[in-house]
Image (tube, helix red, strand yellow):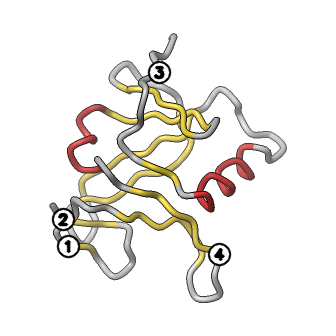
Amino acid sequence: MEATIATEAPVKLSGNAIAEVKRLMSEPGFDASQYLRIGVKGGGCSGLSYVLGFDRMEDDDRAYEIKGIPVIMKDAHGIYLLGMTVDYSDGLNARGFVFNNPNASSSCGCGSSFAV
């Protein structure tokens, strides 16, 4: 399936997130045919949970490229994620991807689910 690359992604990746994703993509055995999927799914303590992982493109995905990283996202998820920045923290107290979403009206303590 040939992807149509949109000009600007509705989400942004911080410099730290870009570095971590590229590190993961450079690991031995990484399947280079996969894209970084950013999205949402129902569930979590606040109503919606973030999706972030490598996946194959599906028919209803839109493809983007962010600093050399192939990214896919469902069009329907854009209303929840427009303007969001994904960061990566490597601190002593917290390590992992962090979602800074201006559309979230509330979020849970773990930061992986939110309400709009």
Mark 3 and mark 2: Cα distance apart in space: 29 Å
Label 1 – label 4 distance at C-alpha: 24 Å
Residue 70 position within the rendered picture, expressed as x and y whole percent measured from the top left: 57, 33
- Callout 1 touching callout 4 (CB < 8 Å): no
Q: Residue 25 falls in which quadrant of the image?
A: top right
Please state if 91 lies on the left or on the right of 77 as rendered. right
The amino acid type found where label 1 is placed reads: Ser
Tell me which amino acid carries mark 3: Ile
Q: Earlier in the sequence, mark 2 or mark 1?
A: 1
Mark 3 or mark 1, whichever is nearer to me:
3
Dot 4 or dot 3: first in sequence order is 3
Q: Which residue is mark 2?
A: 115
Give the numbered dot on residue 5.
3
Disc 3/disc 1 C-alpha distance (Å): 32 Å
- Provide the secondary structure element on which disc 3 rests: loop
Q: Which residue is mark 1?
A: 106
Vertical side of 75 occupied by 87: above or below: below
Q: Quadrant of residue 76?
A: top left
Q: Which residue is mark 4?
A: 90
Q: Nearer the viewer, residue 68 or 56?
A: 68
Residue 14 drawn at (x, y percent): 54, 58
Q: Residue at x 49, y 16 (%)?
A: 3
Residue 32: image location, x then y, percent: 70, 30
Amino acid at dot 4: Asp
Q: 27 or 21: nearer the eye?
A: 21
Q: Residues within 10 Å of mark 2 (few under 14, many from 20)?
A: some
Q: Residues within 10 Å of mark 4 (few under 14, many from 20)?
A: few
Closest to the observer, 59 or 87: 87
Residue 78, percent across and down?
A: 27, 41
Q: Amino acid at mark 2?
A: Ala
